[in-house]
Image: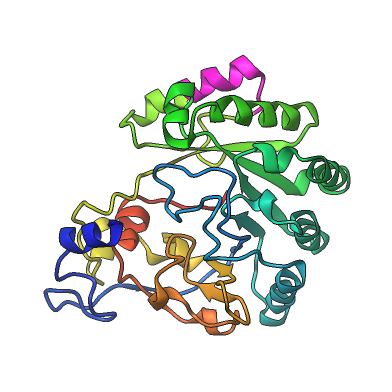
Amino acid sequence: MKDNALQLANIGKFQNKFVTADGQTRASVALTNPETLWFNTGTLCNIECVNCYIASSPTNDALVYITAAEVTDYLNQIEERNWPIREIGFTGGEPFMNPEMIEITRAALERGFEVLILTNAMQPMMRRKMREGLLELQRDYKDKLTLRISVDHYRPELHDEERGVGSFAKTVTGMEWLRDNNFTMAVAGRSVWGDTDGDSRAGYAAFFKAHDFDIDAQNPGETVLFPEMDETIEVPEITTACWDILNKSPDAVMCASARMVVKRKGADRPAVLACTLLSYSPEFEMGTTLAEAEADVHLNHPHCAKFCVLGGASCSG
């Protein structure tokens, strides 16, 4: 249904990789400064959110669990390609559903990378094996590990509207455990309710203060407020002329500095994607190696325009 809505809203657009619907040269983005390599740990999740961009759920295994050996292979490729990667990010699904998550995280931390894990901080993270593993990682690599918690809204009833009744309380319990064990935390919120940026940050600040969470609500790197990817809204195509019109550099777009590795169900090997937002779009699959992923990315999708170029979003910390 979402695909049909997207096609109706943007009929005639985003059809040609190189040319827009009105015949102009489509903008592309070069990988100028690879700073973050993302891994999707698998699309399985303990909950099913109303507006999950990747449709994660307890039954969606379209992207299967990536293994520690596969992650290590890409970490080796970073060295071979001499990519100036600063950060390794893990997203899902829910990363702590992956049984090798602690081993995977350690593999990245051992190389000296900063590690960012996106989690809902609910039951999968709170299992004894995961908590014990996290405490070991915290002991060995405290300053390198950050967990970004999905708190869709600072009001429990609105958060639960997206994630299910009782979800907010369970997430807060996980965050309190992280707080009590001195983990570095960040939060990811959403703008689906139309709050202003100022109102949202004030609300999160009050929430953080009430729970003694050491998170800066005014810092966009610590409290990330993501624009919604409404596929029923018409968006403009981005041409090469747009950079000057918008006074924006292609270097500021996410695919100039990041790639994501996924393992598709039934695939022999993981694949590298242009970004974290287009996991199900074959056109944005760049091959199985980082060498292949050094190609330019043509902005031939509505999300490229609304979420990245016009919305200015970044998944990195």
Return the x and y of residue 144 as percentages of the image width and height. Answer: 75, 49
- Residue at 77 percent of width and 40 percent of height: 127
Number of numbered discs overlaid on the protein picture: 0
Return the x and y of residue 70 as percentages of the image width and height. Answer: 71, 73
Query: Residue 290's image quarter?
Result: bottom right
Is the magenta region chiefly helix, strand or loop?
A: helix
Relative placement, left or right, of 207 versus 283 is right
- Residue at 29 percent of width and 49 percent of height: 230
Residue 92 included in the magenta stretch of the image: no
The part of the chain drawn in magenta is 203-214
- Find the residue positioned furthest to the front: 59
Relative placement, left or right, of 278 versus 25 is right
Question: Is residue 26 something one can see in this rendering?
Answer: yes
- Find the residue positioned furthest to the left: 22
Give the vertical position of 178 relative to 15 (above or below): above
Return the x and y of residue 48 as percentages of the image width and height. Answer: 49, 44
Relative placement, left or right, of 21 versus 104 is left
45, 174: nearer the viewer: 45
- Residue at 75 percent of width and 29 percent of height: 177
Give the vertical position of 232 relative to 199 (above or below): below
